[in-house]
Image (spheres, rainbow, N blue to C red):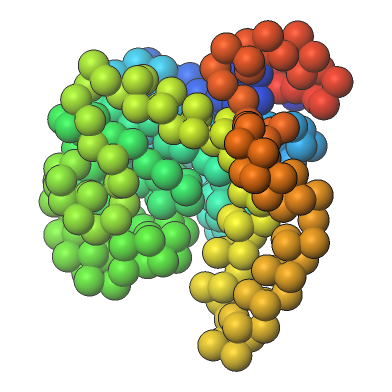
Amino acid sequence: MHRFTTLIVESQGMIGRITLNRPHRRNAFDRTMVTELQQAFEAVTQVPALRGIVLGAAGSVFCAGADIQWMQAESPVSESQATEDAHQLTCMLHAVDQCPCPVIARVQGSAFGGGLGLLAACDIVVAATDTTFALSETRLGLVPAVIAPFLLRKAGESFLRRYGLSGELFDASSAQRFQLVHDIVPPHTLDTRIIELTDALMRLAPFAVRDSKALFRRMSTLSDPDRRSLATETNAHARRGAEAAEGLAAFVEKRLPSWAHSPDRQSTEEATSSDHGTLRHT
């Protein structure tokens, strides 16, 4: 089991929580945090009972991007080390993106540079109304290269040209317009909205959700004929599965399906979650 120094990793029933925990550095990335984020999200794949992950941050800021003091302390960096650091960041974002269950980002304060790329790798992003965002790399003589593929997929080339070339700040409404943020809520209701979303996940068929996420991710890389073939195959497989049988029976019998958990029911079953694996590392 990993022991993390830059993260808090825990589970609350069937919901995992990964919290960036360098508030004294505005949760900026250093080599350790990038490595630990990758390890944490890879560990999630070993806990099949988890219905979702909430990615948040301690303190007043979600993530300020790269830790400038750390980068400066290592300057001049060798080509091999710079390449390894870039590769590690790519692997971390890939691990977030490939997480089999939904990842919900809880965003407050600001998300700059690599922090914005981290959001682009998440499935659902909820931000406080006063959050600010920026692709700030060019202010520092850097290029937002590693995060660009994730931002391109999520927000498009127009966004990258507009804010990647200007480095300007933009607000939560603009982030929502570019589909980087899905929900904008007042700061004092941020946790309430997160709870609403995690409660919603607890009412869904868990393997159907995981299969849906895998389907959506694969479809974006396929040609139209291959998309149709994948859709047909996935639909047929799901229809013949145990979750579909239970879901259809529950609908006809006017009852909740076996996988549906209300908050009260979830709390009574948390004591048995260890039978399915758990996350709890600090």
Q: Is residue 233 visible?
A: yes
Residue in view at x 30 percent, y 23 percent: 190
Q: Is residue 136 above or below residue 148?
A: above
Q: Is residue 35 visible?
A: no
Which residue ends up furthest to the bottom in the rendered image?
A: 225
Q: Is residue 136 above or below residue 21?
A: below
Depth check, front residue: 107 or 248: 248
Depth check, front residue: 68 or 110: 110
Residue in view at x 29 percent, y 72 percent: 157
Location of the C terminus by quadrant is top right
Residue 231: x and y, percent? 63, 75
Q: Is residue 211 left or right of residue 178?
A: right
Residue in view at x 57 percent, y 64 percent: 217
Residue 80: x and y, percent? 62, 57
Q: Is residue 51 above or below residue 263?
A: below
Residue 184: x and y, percent? 23, 37
Residue in view at x 17 percent, y 32 percent: 129
Residue 54: x and y, percent? 50, 30
Which residue ends up furthest to the front in the rendered image?
A: 253
Q: Is residue 98 left or right of residue 30?
A: right
Q: How many marks?
A: 0
Q: Is residue 103 left or right of residue 57?
A: right
Location of the N terminus by quadrant is top right
Depth check, front residue: 226 or 112: 226
